[in-house]
């Protein structure tokens, strides 16, 4: 190691688990800001022989495992990417080679991250594994925009929704009318591409045209952008804004809290 090799931050004293050869730890890296990684995640980074990561994991976090081989297994909407079954089997192979394998995913591995599918494959092949949860973008990302995902005055429920299905289309399995009626706050992942269809469906189901909506892209990262709009204006405003994925949409009255709680804006003066 030379002087420029990034040194992983230390861990506070505790009885940290050992990532053993032949094991896979399926770990969430949080929404982007490296400080939102968990200590279990950091412990894994310090021990891994190989880190299999997706596109949403920050380089700064990967730099905390200078000793590990990095394998990119990214999936980005619309772009050619590794097949899910290939990624899962690669994890099995690496574990069978006796590697200490860290599978690192953006946010939480079990929230729209196919972590469950990968874990299923590990079970099928008898590979021992551990799950390390992470802060999901739909909660932590909104918090960085000053939006509480629940606020007692406005919502006693929140629904996490994906705007894509496996084919990249708006999930036809979703009953948007029921969601519109039943959920006070909707937090929509992967919703940018189909924002117009989603907004139209919610409006048709009776949600108010002036209902507040926030779009938070690159949440918790230096390039974070937040756009506040209304359900009726969402699609046009998105077209004009040039905002790109990754982004979270939040539909609900809680979004108005940003007027008071935009802590990053307050710091910037
Ligand atoms: N497992 C992840 C979600 C993976 S799906 C989690 O728990 O957060 C990928 C989608 O997550 C993106 O299309 C986007 O909707 C959302 N996302 C992830 N990171 C984000 C970020 N930093 N800012 C905004 N949205 C993000």
Image (cartoon, helix red, strand yellow):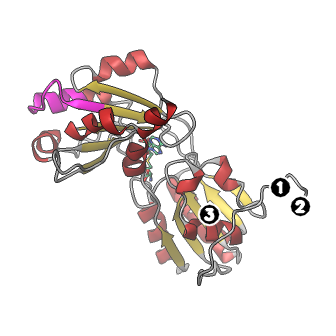
**Circle 1 sits in a helix, a strand or a loop, which is it?**
loop
Relative to residue 106, is residue 188 drawn left or right? left
Residue lying at the far bottom of the rendered structure: 15
Q: Residue at x 18, y 51 (%)?
A: 152
Q: Is mark 1 within 8 Å of ligand 1?
A: no
13 or 126, nearer to the observer = 13
> Is there a contact, CB below 8 Å, between mark 3 and mark 2?
no
Residue 12 in picture, x, y percent from top left: 62, 74
How much space separates mark 3 and mark 1, taking CA atoms? 28 Å
- Crowding at dot 3, Cα within 10 Å, few <14 / some 14-19 / many 20+, comes out as some
Relative to residue 11, is residue 172 drawn left or right? left
Q: Residue at x 38, y 41 (%)?
A: 167
Q: Residue at x 16, y 53 (%)?
A: 156
Residue stretch in magenta = 198-213
Please identify, in this view, whether the residue under mark 3 or under mark 1 is nearer the observer.
Answer: 1
Q: Quadrant of residue 194?
A: top left
Residue that mark 2 sits on: 1
Q: Quadrant of residue 262?
A: top left
Residue 240 in picture, x, y percent from top left: 40, 15
> Is there a contact, CB below 8 Å, between mark 2 and mark 1?
yes
Residue that mark 3 sits on: 90
């Amino acid at each position: 190691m030379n002087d420029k090799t990034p040194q992983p931050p230390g861990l506070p004293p505790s009885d940290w688990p050992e990532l053993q050869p032949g094991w896979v730890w399926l770990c969430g890296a949080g929404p982007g800001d490296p400080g939102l990684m968990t200590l279990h995640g950091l412990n894994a980074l310090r021990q891994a022989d190989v880190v299999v990561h997706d596109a949403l994991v920050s380089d700064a976090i990967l730099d905390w495992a200078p000793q590990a081989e990095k394998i990119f297994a990214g999936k980005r909407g619309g772009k050619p990417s590794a097949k899910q079954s290939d990624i899962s089997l690669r994890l099995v192979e690496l574990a069978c080679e006796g590697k200490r394998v860290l599978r690192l995913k953006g946010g939480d591995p079990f929230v729209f991250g196919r972590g469950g599918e990968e874990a299923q494959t590990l079970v099928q092949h008898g590979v021992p594994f551990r799950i390390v949860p992470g802060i999901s973008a739909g909660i932590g990302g909104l918090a960085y925009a000053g939006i509480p995902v629940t606020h007692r005055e406005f919502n006693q429920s929140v629904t996490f929704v994906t705007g894509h299905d496996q084919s990249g289309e708006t999930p036809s399995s979703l009953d948007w009318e029921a969601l519109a009626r039943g959920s006070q706050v909707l937090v929509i992942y992967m919703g940018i591409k189909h924002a117009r269809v989603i907004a139209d469906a919610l409006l048709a189901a009776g949600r108010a045209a002036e209902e507040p909506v926030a779009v938070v892209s690159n949440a918790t990262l230096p390039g974070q952008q937040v756009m506040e709009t209304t359900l009726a204006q969402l699609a046009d405003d998105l077209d004009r804004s040039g905002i790109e994925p990754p982004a979270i949409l939040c539909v609900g009255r809680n979004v108005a809290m940003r007027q008071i709680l935009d802590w990053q804006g307050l710091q910037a003066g």
